[in-house]
Image (cartoon, rainbow, N blue to C red):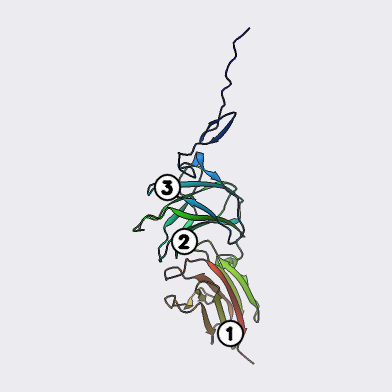
């Protein structure tokens, strides 16, 4: 009778045999893999949902993978469990080549750090969580979350500005970091208009331009006590004016993203 042969389990890169199946090749004592091949798959979560994790030593990194669809915005956040104004962890989004994903931007706020991207093509994206470089102490515990924020709500360029009729209010979101939402107003000579924006969690700012692209007004962004701004457009040239909306990023308690409202009111009787 032929001798029995042991069946070998063939596993993909980043995985190792585990009985008759395979498991991720994660270092003993580590909760998530240190490489793209051993990244933990995650799905978009509900708002305010998060999952607990640990960096088991100061040099540890945790890798996660998720699928993106072109034209949608994704945000991966790590919430460092510590007091103070500096996050204890940092997130970087990576492509399949292991390099920082083009178009992705990271920003930190009080005890959290997020990296977001408007996906230009579908595929797999990786999130790398590591200790925040400037943190003076090592805090191993953190929570992570992944949000699918949907498509960009408004155009980012002057040529594609969204027309806002006088007397209306629109709501939007600045995301990812560095995003602009651009609106247009067809002004009539001899009339005056009040432009107003208000941020839900961060300070909202405006950059107002005339029909020729000349800058008429720009918000001062250092007043952290105010989340709104108003500008009265008077004595202007007739024609299409544009308003670029943005969110403060270089002030305390603001991470450069957030929801807002924008309105145009006629000041004439």
Q: Position of residue 206 (x, y in %)?
A: 51, 75
Q: Name the N-terminal-most of marks 1 and 2.
A: 2
**Residue 240 location, quadrant:** bottom right
Q: Residue at x 42, y 53 (%)?
A: 140
Confirm or deny contact between disc 2 and disc 3 (CB under 8 A): no
Mark 1 = which residue? Answer: 193
Residue 56, disc: 3
Choose between 89 and 153: the one closer to the eye.
Answer: 89
The kind of secondary structure element at disc 2 is strand
The kind of secondary structure element at disc 3 is loop
Q: CA distance from mark 1 to mark 3?
A: 57 Å
**Residue 192 location, quadrant:** bottom right
Asked whether residue 131 is in view, the answer is yes
Q: CA distance from mark 2 to mark 3?
A: 19 Å
Q: Nearer the viewer, mark 1 or mark 2?
A: 2
Q: Name the N-terminal-most of marks 2 and 3.
A: 3
Q: Name the N-terminal-most of marks 1 and 3.
A: 3
Q: Residue at x 56, y 23 (%)?
A: 8
Q: Quadrant of the C terminus?
A: bottom right
Asked whether residue 187 is in view, the answer is no
Mark 2 = which residue? Answer: 112
Residue 60, disc: none
Q: Residue furthest top?
A: 1
Q: Residue at x 48, y 66 (%)?
A: 256
Choose between 140 and 74: the one closer to the eye.
Answer: 140
Q: Position of residue 113 (x, y in %)?
A: 46, 59
The kind of secondary structure element at disc 1 is strand
Q: Nearer the viewer, mark 2 or mark 3?
A: 3
Q: Is residue 149 above or below residue 249?
A: above
């Amino acid at each position: 009778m032929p001798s029995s042969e042991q069946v070998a389990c063939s596993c993909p890169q980043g995985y190792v045999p585990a009985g008759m199946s395979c498991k991720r090749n994660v270092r003993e004592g580590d909760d998530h893999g240190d490489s793209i091949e051993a990244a933990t798959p995650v799905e978009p979560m509900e708002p305010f949902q998060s999952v607990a994790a640990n960096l088991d030593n100061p040099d540890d990194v945790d890798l996660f993978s998720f699928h993106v669809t072109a034209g949608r915005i994704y945000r991966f956040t790590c919430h460092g469990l510590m007091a103070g104004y500096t996050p204890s962890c940092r997130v970087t989004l990576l492509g399949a080549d292991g390099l920082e994903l083009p178009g992705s931007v990271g920003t930190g706020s009080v005890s959290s750090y997020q990296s977001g991207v408007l996906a230009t093509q579908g595929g797999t994206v990786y999130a790398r969580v590591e200790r925040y470089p400037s943190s003076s102490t090592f805090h191993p515990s953190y929570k992570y979350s992944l949000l699918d924020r949907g498509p960009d709500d408004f155009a980012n360029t002057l040529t594609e500005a969204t027309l806002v009729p006088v007397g209306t209010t629109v709501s939007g979101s600045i995301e990812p970091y560095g995003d602009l939402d651009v609106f247009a107003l067809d002004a009539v000579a001899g009339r005056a208009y009040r432009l107003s924006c208000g941020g839900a969690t961060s300070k909202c700012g405006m950059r107002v331009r005339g029909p020729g692209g000349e800058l008429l007004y720009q918000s001062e962004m250092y007043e952290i006590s105010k989340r709104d701004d108003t500008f009265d457009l008077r004595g202007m040239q007739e024609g299409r004016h544009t308003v670029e909306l943005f969110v403060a990023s270089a002030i305390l308690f603001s991470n450069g993203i957030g929801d807002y409202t924008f309105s145009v009111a006629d000041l004439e009787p």
